[in-house]
Amino acid sequence: MRKRPLNVLIFLGSPREDGNSTRLAFAFADAASRNGHAVQSLRLSALEFAPCDGCGDCWPTAARPCVLRDDLEAVYPLLRKADVLVFATPLHFYAWSTPLKKLTDRLYCLSPQFKRNLKGKTSVLLAAAADDRPAAFAGLKATYRLVADYMGWKRLGEVLVGGLDAPDAVSRNGRALARADALGARLA
Ligand SMILES: Cc1cc2nc3c(=O)[nH]c(=O)nc-3n(C[C@H](O)[C@H](O)[C@H](O)COP(=O)(O)O)c2cc1C
């Protein structure tokens, strides 16, 4: 019997509309959709939300993870429903992009210290950078792995592609897109 389709939630962290990390994300998404999974992508730069202010008033009511009233109110239920969380980002100053940093800080209210959390989800990191040295991704990779382990997420894999500068550069790198596709296809 076929297992139920997975809910895949993709966060597009680039300020570029159709840039390299987004193209990696769409390759991943195409493969996941081919396998019958439900994929939703959210462009973080299109959402208006504040950074975490560290108030510590998480879960002011049973229905609301965060006291801040902004676009993330609608995203929290999607996060909780998702089976797979995909983070797609450009490398910005050797870290993930500001919108993605802002998002992850706002996941504090769903961390394992709270009864309602995101434990047990599967996560994926997709990233694009201009620098073509593998070491360029060291900080991002370490951050992602620490965050995933802290949050209790399984790590399905990472596709980290250097040597990309122009927004469409990855489209001339069939191997990189194939790696993102292959990772998406692992969601059997
Ligand atoms: C503000 C900013 C900071 C960047 N910092 C880095 C960096 O630290 N290392 C690097 O290799 N590339 C850096 N880049 C280049 C981007 O990572 C690269 O162009 C990437 O392909 C962009 O992905 P995107 O098209 O998904 O936005 C930076 C670009 C910008 C705009």
Image (cartoon, rainbow, N blue to C red):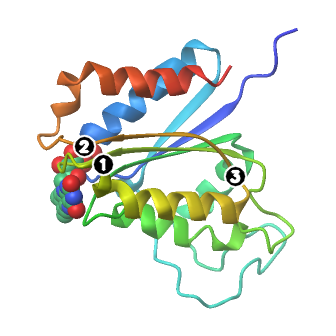
- Find out if the beta carbon at label 2 lies less than 8 Å from the nearest ligand 1 atom: yes
Describe residue 154's horizontal placement relative to residue 156 as left or right.
Answer: right
Q: Label 3 to label 1, Cα distance in Å? A: 24 Å
* Residue ID for mark 2: 162
Q: Are marks 2 and 1 in contact (CB under 8 Å)?
A: yes
Describe residue 160's horizontal placement relative to residue 11 as left or right.
Answer: left
Q: Label 2 to label 1, Cα distance in Å? A: 7 Å
* Residue ID for mark 1: 134
Residue 119 in percent (x, y) is at: 77, 56
Is residue 22 in view? yes
Secondary structure found at label 1 = helix
Describe residue 184's horizontal placement relative to residue 83 as left or right.
Answer: left
Which mark is drawn over residue 153?
3
Work out whether residue 11 or residue 89 is closer to the camera in this orientation and state it: 89
Against 18, residue 184 (above or below) is above
Describe residue 108's horizontal placement relative to residue 33 as left or right.
Answer: right
- Mark 2 or mark 1, which has the lower sequence index? 1
